[in-house]
Image: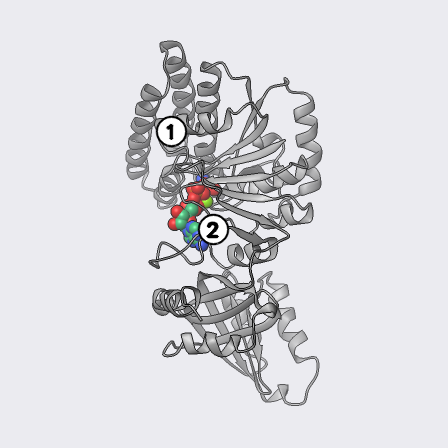
Amino acid sequence: MKVYKFGGTSVGSPENMRMVRQIITDGEPKLVVLSAMSGTTNSLVEISSHLYQQHPHKASEVMARLEEKYARVVEALYATPEYREKGQVVTEGIFRMMRLFLHKSFTLKEEKILVAQGELLSTQLFTLLMQESGHSTFLLPALDFMRVDEERAADLPAIRTLLLELIDNSPRVDYYITQGFICRNPAGEIDNLERGGSDYTASLVGAAIDAEEVQIWTDIDGFHNNDPRFVSNTRKIDQLSFNEAAELAYFGAKILHPQTIFPARIQNIPVRLKNTMNPSDSGTLITTRSDGSGIKAVAAKDGITAIKIRSGRMLMAYGFLKKVFEIFERHKTPIDMISTSEVAVSLTVDNTRHLEEIHHALMAFGEVEIDRDMSIICIVGDIIREETGFASRVFNALDGIPIRMISYGGSRYNISVLVPTSHKTSTLQTLSDKLLNASF
Ligand code: ADP
Ligand code: ASP
Ligand code: MG
């Protein structure tokens, strides 16, 4: 069976939902993962922040606007009064429950329940649409099988056991629908895979059922060689390797949630990116193979903090880095980039939750310097196969950009540079102009 995932824009209007119906009903059975309609999760996050700040009035206003939007969606989505009524029952039930949050204390637990409602809405409304048009369809509740562990990492063995059991006990249908993004934690509470997490749901579900292929349907024709939100003249890439795609997703390519590739790579399941608005386009195929050689694409990850520790104690010493790493480990803070000299080590983190404590602990080793608002620019490709002179071409292209750190040689797929976020767009554009789109 194939797994298809449709993102926010793909299910963002009644028209688009009908388009999704047309794409999936090609006679092949499928498991379909849906995001919330575009804008919904953002509205739910906005409602949550009003409730945290104890502004129930503002929260109520945003909720009312969202409810009106769903009333219009239900009105336009179905062909028959019977299904319009079923749609109304779904939306009214969910908004009635959400309104209860306006009057009670609001914690992280309530927030997670609230932000889960977008996927619960879209999947129920879409399942009704499929049933109205006579397609044998069944809704598999993601909360019954999607699991994360204490660290909020996906628990694939548990997901596999629960999902296979659930499918076994469900009616035999052509189309199974489920929610992206949402899951339960070990306490049994509603949780999520973080923003953009529906892609990750799709690859986890694909790995759990050993799918033939995972298709991620979105609003663009595939993986581009640069970020189209910031750079003009980007180009679609036909084929990427799992390693290349994983690096790009991890280092900020929004088209894929950072973790999406891992479950697919473990089980060698092809991942295809497709455009819901242009289904006949072949999109981008991600497998063990990559086409061509050399530099493929660049991506940028914002919100990076650089930490430099300058210490006389590093000179000729061993065991110093271990002690530094232990501090990050103790505070559960992953390190992305690292570069060292005889007297200093620089590294980057994107999680600053424990920065204060880390800063304090590092001061025992020497002088500590912290730079915020940095971006990692990641250049990806089969770099080993590049002809010599690769590094000089990259540095020539980056002439005039204030580079704070460089990481090269860590893997054959990636070279990363750290720049102030204020220089991100110009760095991406110059890489497109001088490296990706230039003919040599
Ligand atoms: P969905 O709601 O379908 O999950 P997203 O907005 O999360 O869609 O991801 C698709 C968007 O990712 C595109 O519209 C595009 O603006 C952005 N994007 C960023 N980097 C890339 C890239 N390298 N290739 C394609 N799209 C990218
Ligand atoms: N709806 C969630 C979000 O907007 C998950 C997703 O769309 O992937 O982040
Ligand atoms: Mg997305």
Residue 60 on image: x %, y % = 31, 33
Give me the disc on residue 124: none
Classify the position of the C terminus by image quarter: bottom left
**Residue 81 figure quarter:** top left
Residue at mark 2: 223
Residue at mark 1: 99
Instruction: Give the residue at x 57% y 62%.
Output: 333
Instruction: Give the residue at x 49% y 79%.
Output: 392
Looking at the image, tell me whether mark 2 or mark 1 is earlier in sequence order: 1
Q: Is residue 425 above or below residue 57?
A: below
Q: Amino acid at mark 2?
A: Phe
Instruction: Give the residue at x 47% y 66%.
Output: 376
Q: In the current view of this chain or complex, which residue is farthest to the front?
A: 440
Q: Is residue 239 left or right of residue 133?
A: right
Instruction: Give the residue at x 61% y 44%.
Output: 270
Classify the position of the N terminus by image quarter: top right
Q: Residues within 10 Å of mark 1 (few under 14, many from 20)?
A: some
Q: Secondary structure at mark 2?
A: loop
For disc 1, does the CB lie below 8 Å from ligand 2? no
Residue 279 on image: x %, y % = 44, 36
**Residue 189 figure quarter:** top right
Label 2 – label 1 distance at C-alpha:
40 Å
For disc 2, does the CB lie below 8 Å from ligand 1? yes
Q: Is residue 359 above or below residue 114?
A: below
Q: Amino acid at mark 1?
A: Arg
Q: Is residue 163 left or right of residue 371?
A: right
**Residue 290 figure quarter:** bottom right
The mark closer to the camera, 2 or 1, is: 2
Q: Nearer the viewer, residue 136 or 46?
A: 136
Q: Secondary structure at mark 1?
A: helix
